[in-house]
Image (cartoon, grey):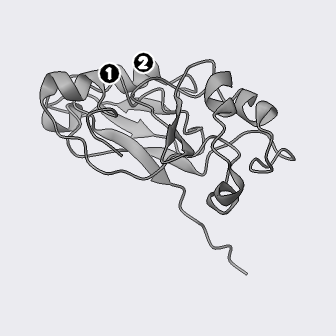
Amino acid sequence: MDPRTSISRRTFLTGRVPTASLRILPPGMAENMLAACTGCGACAEACPTEIIGLVEGKPSLDFQAGECLLCGDCASVCPEPVFDRAVPPAFAHVVAIAEACLARNGVSCMSCRDACPQTAIALRPRIGGPFLPQLDKTACTGCGACIAPCPVQAISVSPMALEIADG
């Protein structure tokens, strides 16, 4: 992938060099299904928020461009068996808030909380400093709405932790 064609406006204006990141698949698509993808681009054309692009001929989401509405339009137009249509569209990730977060560094910021459509990010008060963002992983859909508004790019996707049932 050529970094000159995949750079976001924020990355360009701040002078940050894009780093290699994991491919974020459209909701309902698993990594093992990706091999069946022909790269036709129908999913990208159907995406109402235009966050699906083809990277190396396969779909990938760019949350710097917007959020996923979990509408399922990408799955409904796909001619190949790459989406699990038996279940509602969902992601296998949630977001993670890094230590670079402004609030964690003494600067008041509420952009992630304000952007979250699921109210999965709450602000917890603390003595002597700004409120801290606290993520409710059970409420987070992984839609990415909080990623682009973060002024310091401290939010990224994180695979859901697999919990082992006591048995």
In the displayed structure, 28 sits above or below 159; it is above
Q: Name the spot of residue 43 as percent of width and height, x first.
A: 67, 32
Q: Name the spot of residue 163 as percent of width and height, x first.
A: 60, 67
In the image, is 107 to the left or to the right of 30? left
Badge 1 amino acid: Met
For the point 66% across and 63% down, which residue is it? 32
In the displayed structure, 143 sits above or below 2; it is above
Q: Which residue bears the numbered disc 1?
A: 110
In the image, is 72 to the left or to the right of 112? right
* Residue furthest to the right: 86
For the point 14% across and 37% down, which residue is it? 105
54 or 153: which is nearer to us? Answer: 54
For the point 55% across and 33% down, which residue is it? 143
Label 2: state its secondary structure: helix
Badge 2 amino acid: Asp
Label 1: state its secondary structure: loop
Q: Which residue bears the numbered disc 2?
A: 114
126 or 41: which is nearer to us? Answer: 41
Q: Name the spot of residue 145 as percent of width and height, x first.
A: 48, 26
For the point 21% across and 38% down, which residue is it? 104
Quarter of the view holding residue 141: top right
Q: Are marks 2 and 1 in contact (CB under 8 Å)?
A: yes
120 or 95: which is nearer to us? Answer: 95
Between marks 2 and 1, how big is the CA–CA gap?
6 Å
